[in-house]
């Protein structure tokens, strides 16, 4: 499943941070919290993305990646893994590597990709910029579930 959340659609907390994706997203679900991915501004005012997890249940690998104009970055996602992709700077075209789905992403936009079958997303720089790529995988054989 793919979910695109535009930067202006994410509600910010009083401190300016915003939860981009989490499991679960509210107490009404009666599920135990496992992970959250949060966007905030660092001391210099630049966007950054951090992941908070229950390490007994979720493994996280987070990185910032530069993207050059017209250069492509392919992100392969393993079955059951979730990827939270956030544009920190620039404009980029994200598309399903094997299909017709594609969207233009700008600063602060978030793309969440998850599912029980492996797939990949290709991100091509329309302009130079930076991406945050947060990969979340379960410590068990069960696929991760998320809530926007």
Image: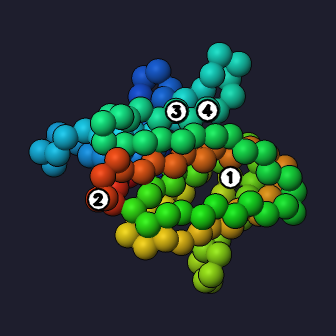
**What is the x, y in percent for residue 32?**
19, 40
Label 4 vs 1, first from the N-terminus: 4
Q: Mark 2 against mark 3, which lies toward the viewer?
A: 2
- Work out whether 59 lies above or below 93: above
Neighbour tally class for label 3: few under 14, some 14-19, many 20 plus, Cα within 10 Å:
some
**Real-space Cα separation, disc 2 to disc 3, in angstroms:** 23 Å
- Residue where numbered disc 2 is placed: 142
Identify the residue shown where x is 26% and y is 46%.
Answer: 24
Neighbour tally class for label 1: few under 14, some 14-19, many 20 plus, Cα within 10 Å:
some
**Real-space Cα separation, disc 4 to disc 1, in angstroms:** 15 Å
**What is the x, y in percent for residue 57?**
31, 42
> Given contact means CB atoms under 8 Å apart, are the residues at marks 4 and 3 in contact?
yes
Q: Mark 3 against mark 1, which lies toward the viewer?
A: 3
> Given contact means CB atoms under 8 Å apart, are the residues at marks 3 and 1 in contact?
no
Identify the residue shown where x is 41% and y is 32%.
Answer: 52
Q: Residue furthest top?
A: 43
**Real-space Cα separation, disc 4 to disc 2, in angstroms:** 29 Å
Q: How is the image coloured?
A: rainbow
Label 4 secondary element: strand
- Residue where numbered disc 3 is placed: 50
Label 1 secondary element: loop
Q: Nearer the viewer, residue 105 or 124?
A: 124
**Real-space Cα separation, disc 3 to disc 1, in angstroms:** 19 Å
Numbered label attached to residue 106? 1
**Real-space Cα separation, disc 2 to disc 1, in angstroms:** 32 Å
């Amino acid at each position: 499943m793919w979910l695109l959340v535009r930067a202006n659609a994410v509600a910010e907390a009083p401190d300016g941070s915003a939860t981009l994706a989490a499991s679960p997203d509210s107490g009404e679900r009666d599920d135990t919290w496992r992970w959250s991915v949060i966007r905030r501004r660092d001391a210099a005012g630049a966007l950054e993305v951090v992941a908070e997890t229950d390490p007994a249940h979720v493994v996280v690998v987070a990185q910032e990646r530069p993207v050059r104009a017209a250069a492509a970055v392919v992100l392969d996602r393993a079955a059951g893994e979730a990827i939270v992709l956030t544009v920190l700077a620039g404009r980029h075209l994200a598309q399903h590597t094997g299909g017709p789905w594609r969207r233009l992403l700008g600063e602060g936009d978030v793309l969440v990709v998850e599912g029980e079958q492996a797939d990949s997303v290709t991100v091509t720089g329309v302009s130079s910029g930076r991406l945050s790529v947060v990969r979340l995988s379960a410590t068990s054989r069960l696929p991760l579930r998320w809530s926007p």
